[in-house]
Amino acid sequence: MEKKLMSGNEAIAYGAYLGRVRVAAAYPGTPSPEILENLVTYPGVYAEWAPNEKVAVDVAAGAAYAGRRALAAMKHVGLNVAADSLFYTSYTGMQAGLVIITCDDPAMHSSQNEQDNRHYARFAKVPMLEPSYSEEAKQFTKLAFDISEAFDTPVLVRSTTRISHSESIVQMEEPPSPTWEELPPYKRDPVKYVMVPANARRRHPIIEERLGKLAAYFEGLDINRIEMGDPALGIVTSGVSYQHAREVFPEASFLKLGTVWPLPVNKIREFASRVKRVVVIEELDPFLEEQLRLIGVECTGKKIFPILGEFNSGLVRDCARRGGLIAGEAAQEAAATAPSPPLAAELPPRPPMLCPGCAHRGMFYVLQHYKAVVLGDIGCYTLGAAPPLLALHTCGCMGASIGVAHGVDKAGCKDRKVAVIGDSTFFHAGIPPLIDVVYNKGATTVIVLDNRITAMTGHQDHPGSGRTLAKEPTVDIKIEDVARAVGFQKVDVVDPLDFKATRAIVKEHLESNEPSLIVARHPCVLYAREFKKPYQIDPEKCNDCGICRRIGCAPLIRADGKMAIDQLLCIGCGFCAQICGRKAITQVA
Amino acid sequence: MTSHKIDFLMAGVGGQGTILSSDILAEVGMMAGYDAKKSEVHGMAQRGGSVETHVRWGEKVYSPMVEQGRVDYLLGFEMLEAARWWHFLGPHSFALVNRYRINPPAVNLGQARYPEPEELEALLKTNQATVQWVPATEVAVELGNQALAGVILLGALSTRLAVAEEVWLDVIARRVPARFVELNKQAFARGRALVSS
């Protein structure tokens, strides 16, 4: 069979397909969306975007209860949302395999916090597998279904950004049989599946016993592998850390763990007895290190390698040198200690920013104009917090904006204030707090920035986009209808790239004393490919007042001491032309 | 480090097409018989921020990321973004840099200065690396689409690697939409010509 370059996420999807997954559900959180985007392309697999991760796990659990292998995928913080469901599935078990993929994001490339989801395996008393590259991502996902069924437990597979979004070579395999046996009638087993206290109490000892059996099974599993080299140094590691460590310690002995919970305690002890010194190399928390200490294996870990951020081989090498694990190479030492040229420190940063032509910019410009306190949420629009807009003042987690705004209101804050939330985020976790505002007689204004797609994570469909994951047309749930249905009476829709209309509606809502909601609707320009002729600035008319600079649109540049528009970057949204008092900005003919 | 290892780093601005180019580069490595790995980070909005992609070819590649001081080839899609990685270069390194400027926000706000190309070149040469400028975006615009700059850079890079031109062209044909294949092949040839003459 041929080989193919695959990202970790593609390989997870391929492994699930080879493992005969039938139903998959996910909410697209970075770095996880490509798992379902790939899975939906395989024959015989049903895959859907769920409005949030909890729903995704419930859907997968239902399919597994009914007797079909099922998968749910999410980013690390998505598992916080789905934690309730993870815990009950741990107790109930299932009729067919249930695999939950968690994609952690060390270094927070696109996340609000750094979180080590290995703790969830221990917390929920379920096994966790951790691949180190794409081929293992395929194998481990497939294996996870077998383990799930053999031990009647959901299985967590943990990836990280550098697994999910790195490509490496994967061996292609024979496709599974395209035919499916008919599903038997639903198996009713209330003692196992109805988690009322009396039943749950019966289940708990079974869960504890299950962990013991899993640990025994993992002792002999070849994905927990001792690779003997020089016995002077023994490295215990897993995930992508294994790869970085292999670069830095080509001669050392390794215990590469494919299962990070429960741990193969005897194998760890055996490894420790065969080497002189044990060093644990793991990103984020000292999870393995603490467990090694608990079983009496003396080791070094976080004393040498940081608890913060993401590893790479350069960082592992530097730490190892400082920690005395490797001798410094003279040339490397010299390079590491040589002073940086002064210019290096002066290079202007280039943080993520709203795209040229992004309609969110229109709303933030207006909110900045009214000096509103903006209780924000998770999405592209969080970038409204960046200079020069500086128009978003909190961002915590999916759906937090509306509840936080209601709390600010109930505290008696007199500032003008609004909650700002994206369309996909609204469907994810924005509806219960919307109900809270009405139910508890709040007066919060909610602005839903509806760009018709889950933009930040790469343009995934959602319940308001009118299409499913499989790109089939479906009901397009209108945010304004949801707001009216729960009791909002003041509801308006506006195009945020229409400056005057947006300014008028926002003013009216800010001044009202009732709960109100504005849907600021304009499709993501990148997704709709709304690329028009660029605009230009007439240098004769421009008096360099600086107003256009305040919207922070990349094509608006300074060239030769004057404002100008970069013709290659401008996509022709025309918002800057609307705010220019001198009418100096016009579209190129 | 074995001599069979080739480490590439691509740096640019979100939206310039670094990911497509690195997909092509990684697959060319695999087709040429190397173990190949690629690593990128995306997901924080779509346009305008710094982006970098790592590609590694070798007999056996472990880490998907390149290491400071050890990069063999730096492909700069934008001048400032290339210069940011000066410390990843060493005396053996070769930097191919698109002579193209995109102002970061602080420059547009008048709060920072965009360094002169000569200064950026000097920074890239701090550790005795070789630097070659390529007018990739200029040629891409001439061909009718600025997104071709990446393939032009790959064309320029290909002259320095012992991989047959057909392998590159095959991978490009597989990776770009059918209606753009000829244009991309043309861009690749222009890139080769830019450095071979």
Image (cartoon, coloured by chain):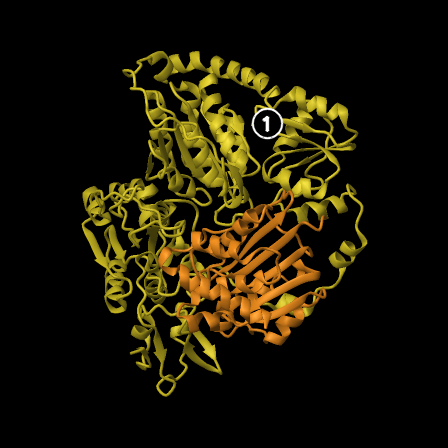
Chain colours: A yellow, B orange
Q: Secondary structure at mark 1?
A: loop
Q: Quadrant of residue A347?
A: bottom right
Farthest residue in the bottom direction?
A540
Q: Which residue is mark 1?
A: A223
Subunit ID for the residue under disc 1: A
Q: Quadrant of residue A467?
A: top left
Tell me which residue sits at (48%, 38%) in the image.
A11
In this rendered view, identify the residue nearer to me: B195 or A331. Answer: B195
Judge whether residue B11 can be spotted in this image. Answer: yes
Q: Is residue A112 left or right of residue A56?
A: right
Judge whether residue B40 can be spotted in this image. Answer: no
Q: Is residue A246 left or right of residue B114?
A: right
Image coords of residue A464 (percent x, y): 26, 46
Q: Amino acid at mark 1?
A: Ile
Placement of the C terminus of chain A among the 4 image quadrants: bottom left
In this rendered view, identify the residue nearer to me: B187 or B65. Answer: B187
Q: Is residue A411 left or right of residue B16?
A: left
Answer few, some or many: residues within 10 Å of disc 1's Cα (few below 14, many 20 plus, some between 14 and 19): some
In this rendered view, identify the residue nearer to me: A152 or A163. Answer: A163
